[in-house]
Image (cartoon, rainbow, N blue to C red):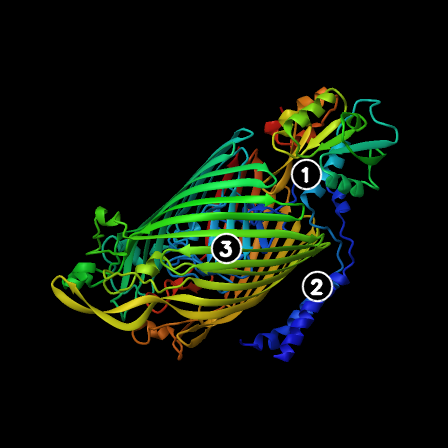
Amino acid sequence: MNFSFWRIKFPSIVTAWIFLLSLQLNYYAQPKEKEIHAVLINKISSYLVWPENTLDDTVFNIGVYGDDKFGKLLDELFKERQVFNKEIKVKKVRSSADLLKCNSVFFAEIPKADLLEMLIKIVNKPILTFGNSKGYSKLGIHVNFYISENRIRFEINEDALKRSGLYAPPSLLKLAEPMNRN
Amino acid sequence: MFGIKIKITVLVALFLFSNIFSQDTAKTSELFDLSIAELMDISVVTSAKWEQNIFETSSKVTVISEKEIKERGYHDLMDVFQSLPFFQIQSQQGHWTKGGLVNFQGLRSGDSGNNKILILIDGLEINDEGGEGIFLGLNSIPLNSVKQIEIVNGPNSTLYGRDAFGAMINIITIKESKSYAGYSSGTFNSQRIYGGVSHKFEEDIFGSINYFNYRSDEQDPTKISLAYKLREVFPDHPYTEQFYRASDNKYLGLKFNYKDFSLHYNLFDIDVAETYGSNPNLYVVEYSTRLAFVNQQFALHYSSNYNNLLNLEAEFQWKKNEFDPRTANLYTGDLNRSDSLFAYGGRKYYYFKTESYAYKIQNIAEISDKIKNVSGIELEDIRGIPVISEGKGGEPISTETQRNKFEHYFKNWGVFSEFNYTAFENLIMSFGGRIDHHSLHEPTFMPRVAFIYNRGNHLLRFTFSTGYIAPSVTQSFFESITTFSWIKPNTNLKAEKNSSHQFDWSYVSKEININAGMFFNILEDAIVESVTTGDSAFVNVGGTNYRVPILMSRNVSSGRRYGFSLSASKTLFDRLTASANYSLILGEDKVLNKEIHVNKNHVSNHKIHLGLQYTRGMISCYTELFWLSRKSIKSNHTTGKYAILSDSEGYINFDPVFLANANLRVNNILDGFSIYVRVKNIFDNEYYGQTINAQWGAPVVLQDMRRIDLGFDYEF
């Protein structure tokens, strides 16, 4: 090998690294998909208009059905966060009784029959539902995340939202996949 | 040697210290500061056959978005490559490719095409299965319906097989409902007409049709070459330094998805003409020719996610690539020749065709939260016709029967598997391998091992991978060069091997992105085309025996490539973004015991690229500057007219190149209607690339002079 490379370029490389190290910058991590889901759950919940007197005075309960790991992530991320100036509590959802205690629920990928069984219990209740599985929107999930062209997108089932008494402002609907609004 | 080890250790330590001392304030919580729209703009990049965050990929991936393609005025892949570190345009004109040869990390493309990189459109390989590379040319692939381009550094043979030798490009087209149309017109009678309709009928039903036509005289025939005007007859002497070429490239792409099934059809219909000097020693003077490519690809793809362990994909692909000379090379003086050698074979030109059927099945299994695996099997059935000598008095001599008589068959099958293991939160390891069995050549094993460590905004990645290129149909069966008619299998050839070590560090933040990379590639069994063996044979042509030299391809070269790159992009103000990159490529090839530095083999050691993007309201303006250091190539023109181009050691020297491009775009003047003006080579600098290798053929070719294009887009 011609090692003149090291002799000539080595000082330049070291200088370049020192320069890079000296840069004091604000950090912004490249997030993972689930982290973005978590933040979107927080944001979208705040964007929606909720029926009067449906939210608890102090706590906004978010339930997670079928993905405990995601539940832990939400718990960690929402520790010092708020929705409508209310503290966020993350709960595992195991039954329909648990479901009814939530303001918002995230459904992981579960059998279709199980999902329908759960959704039917809250069909007209102001409980916001999220999912990230193909076809969930059609089944009645309010906000369903998916990936398109390596970016996270979401579809909104407007009819289901209306049935639950929730209102999505046009600015939010504009960001959702238009095809799936109905 | 000891000193070098210390220096390497210091470098590694610096990398590590950069992590230790960095204030680890990287928090997902900062995502909460972003708007929903901004959150939706964060890329979760696809690589390694499953969707991955860009911080988890086994090899470095650069993503060029649809927005960047438009804002920067990229018309084709050559424009994209020119802005990236380690890529160098070998020649905008190529030889057989008729549309650009590129080298990556000093891996020169073969004369027959871009065979060191693998190009995919929506995951479908468009490289020739017969190993001829992408001879349809880089300016034939439209970028108008592209959502993003992913450039993967280093070999990807472990997952994609033999052609993913040096790098891989995946062009991902739009999948949303969108229609567009556009037109541009510019210097050298250039025009581009393009349009497409994509429609999502239902959630699982999608269809699209895209059309693209690029026509250009490429150079001004009245200034550059009178020969073009006479190309339908024979060029008059002397036009040796003059060059002219014209292109008419058409593309049609069809895509239809129905639930888990998708159909793809790509048609590249290319018609080109060129006129330039040839080897005055071997032949007489210059030639003018016209040829056509018709490359077609049809694929049926099935993909279904049954459960975490079974995410199945199956694919059938048919490909037919045809290289069709419409006229043979024409030489002044040939008109009056009546000897039988000329009468039999005429001047050199080749007709060849490959047809292939490929079958692929793969499964992606999420074995646990920490372990993922992709495994698959591929079978390729390839047939090709011999390289048929063409041309008699300017006309092709082969009949339709000859053109459809496939005489060369070979099969290749490969199995691959790669595991991705998240060892702990910040460390991902991937390891895998692929074995290929080729019916003509030795089997190959292509492993890949990668360690990806990310902490906060920092990423460290080391990848060892191996890439192979199987000998092409041409290399496997092409022996005689004088008449091109004496052909027998060249079965002793082995696949070329690239053992690649890639190391990169990235820092990604909202304000600045920085990447530094190093690579060290060991090349073995590199094939050198047309190496004189000293053998000769008698060939009987028209009742007369001719003693002709035998030239053939052989594995006679080995080499090394190593280098360094540093890239950064930073948002200076709200509306202004600057990007810069520098790359250094060093190394040498050993051909028949003679060592040649890459710089003496048409590779610039240094490349600098600077880009500036300004956006305000409807207006976006992009300016880029790039500089490539000098390079040389050995010429065999020791006597004759071209000898004057060479230095005392017989090298043709290419001066450093400095070029500037600009693109101004006004978006949405009316709803969906945008206009743009693009200027390439603003200062009209004259610079040269090579045609075919300088040993024979015209050694240098004038590259693009200033080009101005005005155009509009309409999205509806």
- Could you confirm whether marks 3 and 1 are on the same chain? yes
Element marked by disc 3: strand
Mark whose residue sits in front, 3 or 1: 3
Mark whose residue sits in front, 2 or 3: 3
Identify the subunit bearing mark 3. Answer: B
- As drawn, the label of residue A20 is 2
Identify the subunit bearing mark 2. Answer: A
Amino acid carrying mark 1 in the image: Ala
Vertical position of residue B635 compared to residue B572: above or below: below
Drawn side of residue B400 relative to residue A125, left or right:
left
Counting from the top left corner in percent of width and height, residue B326 is at 27, 50
Identify the subunit bearing mark 1. Answer: B
Which residue is located at x 57 percent, y 40 percent?
B310
On-image quarter of the N terminus of chain B? bottom right
* Cα distance in 3D space between marks 3 and 1: 41 Å
**Residue holding disc 1:** B37
Vertical position of residue B409 compared to residue B496: above or below: above
* Residues at circles 1 and 2 in contact by the CB criterion of under 8 Å: no
Task: Assess disc 1: are there few (<14), some (14-19) or many (≥20) residues with their C-alpha within 10 Å of its C-alpha.
Answer: some
- Could you confirm whether marks 1 and 2 are on the same chain? no
**Residue holding disc 3:** B434
* Cα distance in 3D space between marks 2 and 3: 38 Å
